[in-house]
């Protein structure tokens, strides 16, 4: 059974960098048929797709976040990661990692709460 | 970005009721429409993909369809465990976008 688990700091200061990691079990990030996603949810913006990456490193990002976001994959640890720079209070949300094909996420992590505050 | 608009935003229903939720895209998404159920404190769970295909393990009372410009999620006989929030999502093009959600509450 595929499971994804997010980890990272729950509190980030404004203007700093948010870094989260997703550990995958029951599947390999080396898969040629899946993409590895980050999605967030906040009361103000609802569900927002941040971006995804393939194990070969091809990534797509939401243009609304493009300049601040990068996703990377570590095949040796079976993990993938999110890095978001220059965070503000508007980035406060529940962050989910998820596995997808090319049309929809079909396996989600439980989510991790990130608060941006000084 | 493609805007997804769900209606209603919330509804009240009783166990056994037939429930329908609509989702409209701001442009043609060619049936690349997916539905999720989310319960409090949990991640969204995929119910329906590609308009009408039932995800493995999802009860057959959940049905997806298309009618003109609207995509429809129908719960044919509402069960106690179905009280939740439902979201549509278009997978036609990135950035993938979601509807604002429909909360199904107990009458």
Image (cartoon, rainbow, N blue to C red):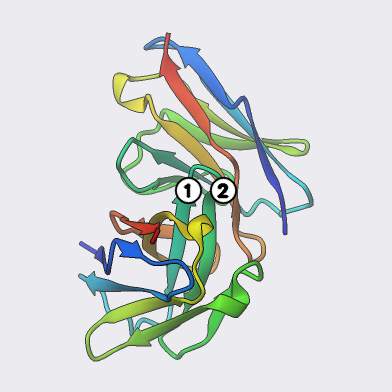
Residue shown at 55% from the left, 77% from the top: A68
Disc 1: which chain? A
Count of numbered labels shown in the rendering: 2
Residue shown at 56% from the left, 48% from the top: A45
In the picture, the quarter occupied by the C terminus of chain A is: bottom left
Q: Is residue A102 left or right of residue A63?
A: left
Provide the residue designation for mark 2. Answer: A45
Q: Is residue A91 above or below residue A20?
A: above
Quadrant of residue A98 within the rendered picture:
bottom left
Visible residue check, residue B49: yes
Looking at this rendering, what residue extends furthest in the front direction?
A118
Under circle 1, the secondary element is strand
Q: Is residue A63 above or below residue B14?
A: below
Nearer to me, B87 or A93: A93
Q: Position of residue A8 (x, y in %)?
A: 27, 69
In the picture, the quarter occupied by the N terminus of chain A is: bottom left
Nearer to me, A100 or A40: A40
Q: Position of residue B4 (x, y in %)?
A: 67, 45
Nearer to me, B19 or B5: B5
Quadrant of residue A13 within the rendered picture:
bottom left
Residue shown at 39% from the left, 11% from the top: B16
Q: Position of residue A117 (x, y in %)?
A: 40, 58
Disc 2: which chain? A
Label pair 2/1, CB-CB below 8 angstroms: yes
Q: Position of residue B69 (x, y in %)?
A: 77, 39
- Label 2 crowd bin: few (<14), some (14–19), many (20+), radius 10 Å: few
- Label 1 crowd bin: few (<14), some (14–19), many (20+), radius 10 Å: some
Provide the residue designation for mark 1. Answer: A42
């Amino acid at each position: 059974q595929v499971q994804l688990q997010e980890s990272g700091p729950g509190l980030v200061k404004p203007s700093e960098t948010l870094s989260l990691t997703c550990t995958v079990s029951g599947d390999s990030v080396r898969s040629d048929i899946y993409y590895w996603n980050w999605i967030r949810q906040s009361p103000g913006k609802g569900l927002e797709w941040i971006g995804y990456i393939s194990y070969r490193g091809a990534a797509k990002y939401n243009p609304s976040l493009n300049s601040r976001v990068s996703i990377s994959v570590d095949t040796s640890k079976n993990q993938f990661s999110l890095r978001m720079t220059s965070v503000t209070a508007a980035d406060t949300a529940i962050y989910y990692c998820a596995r997808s094909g090319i049309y929809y996420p079909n396996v989600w992590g439980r989510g991790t709460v990130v608060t941006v505050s000084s | 970005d493609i805007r997804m608009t769900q209606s209603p935003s919330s509804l009240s229903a009783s166990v056994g009721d037939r429930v329908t939720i609509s989702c409209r895209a701001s442009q043609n998404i060619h049936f690349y429409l997916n539905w999720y159920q989310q319960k409090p404190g949990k991640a969204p769970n995929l119910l329906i993909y590609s308009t009408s295909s039932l995800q493995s393990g999802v009860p057959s009372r959940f049905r997806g369809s298309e009618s003109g410009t609207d995509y429809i999620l129908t719960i044919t006989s509402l069960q106690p465990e179905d009280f939740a929030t439902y979201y549509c999502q278009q997978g036609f093009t990135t950035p993938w976008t979601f509807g604002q959600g429909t909360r199904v509450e107990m009458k």
